[in-house]
Image (cartoon, rainbow, N blue to C red):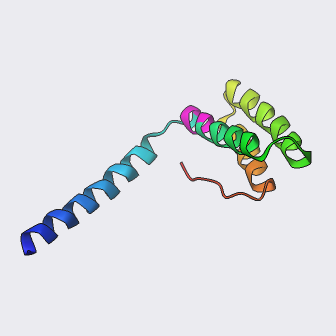
């Protein structure tokens, strides 16, 4: 029983460390794409309307900023739009 518990605990610790390592290995460009993907899904799920129209414009602006190498600005624009929709922002 103790051996099974130790193996299970080691597996959980391994998953935590591997997930943390993956999160720190994302480049700014990848983070920008991931936040843009999240916002795009949010817009699709919420459907057309007042807040989603503004979020769609922010998505376009954020993607444009990221394409010009202004990753921090693009991410800030995109995550700001997610917050304006009243949704939580994933941390990448």
Residue at 32% over, 50% down: 18
Count of labels shown? Answer: 0
User: Which x, y percent locates residue 23?
Assistant: 45, 47
Q: Is residue 21 left or right of residue 32?
A: left
Residue 15 falls left or right of residue 22: left
Please say whether residue 79 is visible from this viewpoint. Answer: yes
Q: Which region of the structure is painted magenta?
A: 29-33
Q: Say which residue appears at 74% left-offset and 31% top-offset.
A: 65
- Using residue 46 as the reference point, say whether residue 21 is left or right of it: left
Single out the residue that lies furthest toward the right.
Answer: 50
Residue 43 percent location from the top left of the image? 76, 42
Magenta stretch holds residue 53:
no
54 and 75: which is toward the camera: 54
Q: Hey, which residue is sitting farthest top in the picture?
A: 68
Q: Is residue 73 visible?
A: no
Give the residue displayed 84% in from the left and 44% down from the top. 52
Q: Position of residue 6 (x, y in %)?
A: 14, 68
Position of the N terminus by quadrant: bottom left
Q: Is residue 79 found left or right of 23 in the rendered image?
A: right
């Amino acid at each position: 029983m103790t051996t099974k518990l130790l193996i299970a605990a080691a597996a959980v610790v391994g998953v935590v460390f591997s997930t943390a390592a993956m999160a720190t290995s994302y480049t700014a460009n990848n983070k920008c794409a991931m936040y843009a993907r999240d916002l795009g899904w949010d817009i699709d799920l919420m459907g057309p309307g007042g807040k989603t129209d503004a979020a769609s414009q922010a998505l376009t602006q954020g993607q444009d900023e990221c394409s010009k190498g202004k990753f921090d600005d693009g991410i800030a624009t995109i995550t700001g739009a997610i917050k304006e929709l009243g949704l939580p922002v994933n941390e990448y």
